[in-house]
Amino acid sequence: MASLSDLPIRDDLRGLTPYGAPQKHVRYALNVNENTHPIPEAVARDIVTSLAHAVLTANRYPDREFTALRESLADYLGHGLTREHVWAANGSNEIIQQLLQAFGGPGRRVLGFPPTYSMHPIITAGVGSTWVTAERDADFEIGPETAVRAIERHTPDLVFLCAPNNPTGTGLSLETIAAAYDATDGIVFVDEAYAEFMPKDRPTALTLLPGRERLVVSRTMSKAFAFAGVRVGYLAADPVIADALRLVRLPYHLSALTQAAAVAALAHTPEMLAMVDDIIGQRDRIIAELPELGYRPWASEANFVLFDGVDDPQATFNALLERDILIRDVGISNALRVTAGTAAETEFFLRSLAELGPGGAR
Ligand SMILES: *Cc1c(COP(=O)(O)O)cnc(C)c1O
């Protein structure tokens, strides 16, 4: 077998590593922040009926503008948004890719604040843009001054904010987003993949959209909506943003089956989101109980918890894996991240961690 260096691959891709969260078959998969609750059977039946209808006309290309889906997503989002403000793709990862194809590309700079979502730099590299970084404040916060200073220093073409932030769970204030917007002529992108898990008093960046045509807010059906396997992400922005993305997207990028499944699921929003409060309860339980085991969890506004105080993250990761639990080593020293799932999953995770003793496995 040949190696990558035998190929005439782009110079700027040499030496890069692909996204690689382990995909292992374990009883307790708490590593990629999925909703661990299955789709309710009544909803699944409705989705299958819609899929069956869509299959009957699958000899034709799908609606290139996925009008019904954008209508459903706009209804779901509220905030006075219409289908013109909404764009969708195969996961929010593809939303980010299209955004970078339109507004990034070779020679342009994307500013991020690590530790943050690992796909942001990877998709940036994929379109030939440069990922530049700035430090966060204490406890992974980003205050308005910190954001503005970083923008003035790096003069990026796009600013990437993740709110709540993955992998830390940290929330982000509207003041910081608005200050970032005022400090740049570029695109300000807010990744709200975990918005449904935010505290009720935390306003979404959607409220900042009116009058800000360079602000883009993305969401996904992969997390709260228990739809990770279907691949549906979307954004809300001024309608002119969708015009930019129409220049770079592949025609018919959302299959008829994806559109049908997503519209059917959105018609059952209350059932699909019924578990969100339970998951928030499990997240808060993890945060409450980890200190009793000697760990320091960070505050989280998402469906996962990052915790410090792990002597040897790889050893603890492996010891939990032996107990059929998969969590995430996100490369932060002495820390690990765990997804909040069902009550039974939380119980088993906490009990197993307790059995490893203070500091975890060595
Ligand atoms: C999980 C996650 C996504 C979701 O990506 P999809 O492609 O929609 O599955 C996006 N952004 C962040 C920060 C995430 O953690």
Image: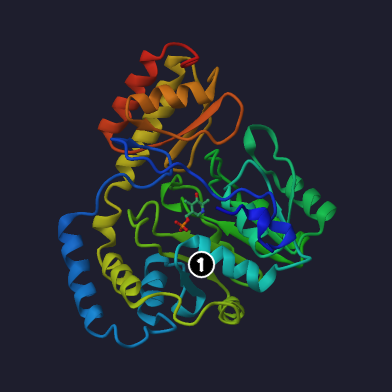
Residue appearing at x 30%, y 53% in the figure: 273
Q: Is residue 298 visible?
A: yes
Residue that protrudes farthest toward the front in the picture: 1
Q: Position of residue 147 (x, y in %)?
A: 73, 49
In this picture, is 317 found above or below 51? above
Q: Position of residue 280 (x, y in %)?
A: 37, 40
Using the image as rendered, state which of residue 122 and residue 168 is in the foreground.
Answer: 122
Query: Within the image, what quadrant is residue 267 found in?
Result: bottom left
Residue appearing at x 38%, y 37% in the figure: 30
Q: In what element is the residue under mark 1?
A: strand
Left or right, 298 with respect to 277, comes to: right
Using the image as rendered, state which of residue 243 and residue 76 is in the foreground.
Answer: 243
Residue that protrudes farthest toward the top in the picture: 357
Counting other residues with Cα less than 10 Å from the Cα at mark 1, is it few (<14), some (14-19), or many (20 or more)?
Answer: many
User: Tag count in the figure?
Assistant: 1
Q: Which residue is mark 1?
A: 235
Q: Position of residue 318 (x, y in %)?
A: 44, 25
